[in-house]
Amino acid sequence: MCVVDCSGLCRELAGLLVVEDDAAGLGIRVAYSLSWGRPVRELDPGRLVAEEEKLLAELRERYRVEELPRDPLVRTYRDFYWRIGIDPTKTRPSSEALVRRALRGKWPRINPVVDAGNIASARMMVPVGLYDAAKFKPPLRITLARGGEEFHPIGGKPEKLEQGTPILVDGDGRVMHVYPHRDSVETMVAQDTTCILIVAAGVPGVQREQLVETVKEVQRLVGLLGWSSCSRVEAKP
């Protein structure tokens, strides 16, 4: 496992990720930052129990499953999905999918860090990506696929991407994410992860402040696990 200086990456945070013009033209915008600490395997998931219980109560108060398609943020992400050729009634935006699972009593538990990201995503209704900083090479780019890039999705088989697909790639061209809903197994948070990049995925109609606050919420939650975070959040473009 490669050792990464996460606090050092904080000093270079502004140049860590770029949204290229072709992706920005679709209205893609992100906020991002870093957090780090002891390996995931050593963290106590019980420290998030109260946060999870609070979230589930909040969601039951705010939403009904049948009314979710009318929520303004849900509509915003669904509209973007239609725009890039994804049927959101079959492939849900990840934040909406989490809320649906919560309302149906099927809240997922993966590991403490991923769980923190899921709590923040469902609370803010913004998709969140978490990436092991030891597994990618900066700088990162959000761009449109030229076609034929290989992607290794979590829980799926490797596939070739179509031209024009919005993607997050690292300095070696590794596809880390298909925007804004699928992450790669190659850079996912695992039991030995000690440093993560947090990305809040925005689309047209989602305000920059909402994305920044989503990242800060993830950082607050991993702070409950004893992790540290960068003191600032970057927003692009």
Image (cartoon, rainbow, N blue to C red):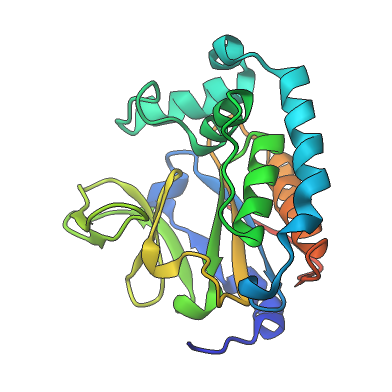
What residue is rendered at 37% in x and 55% in y? 154
User: On the image, which quarter does residue 210 sit in?
Assistant: top right
Residue 212, x across and y down, in percent: 72, 49
Quarter of the rendering containing residue 110: bottom right
**86 left or right, relative to 233:** left
Q: Is residue 181 left or right of residue 231?
A: left
Residue at the spot x=29%, y=60% of the render? Answer: 152
In this rendering, the count of numbered labels is 0
Regarding residue 236, the answer to whether it shows in the image is no
Image side of residue 83 versus residue 125, left or right? left
Vertically, is 82 above or below 123? above
Q: Position of residue 161 (x, y in %)?
A: 22, 51
Where's residue 234, x and y in %?
A: 68, 60
**Could you say which is closer to the camera, residue 37 or residue 208?**
37
Q: Can residue 60 be seen at all in this image of the molecule?
A: yes
| Residue located at (35% from left, 25% from top) | 90
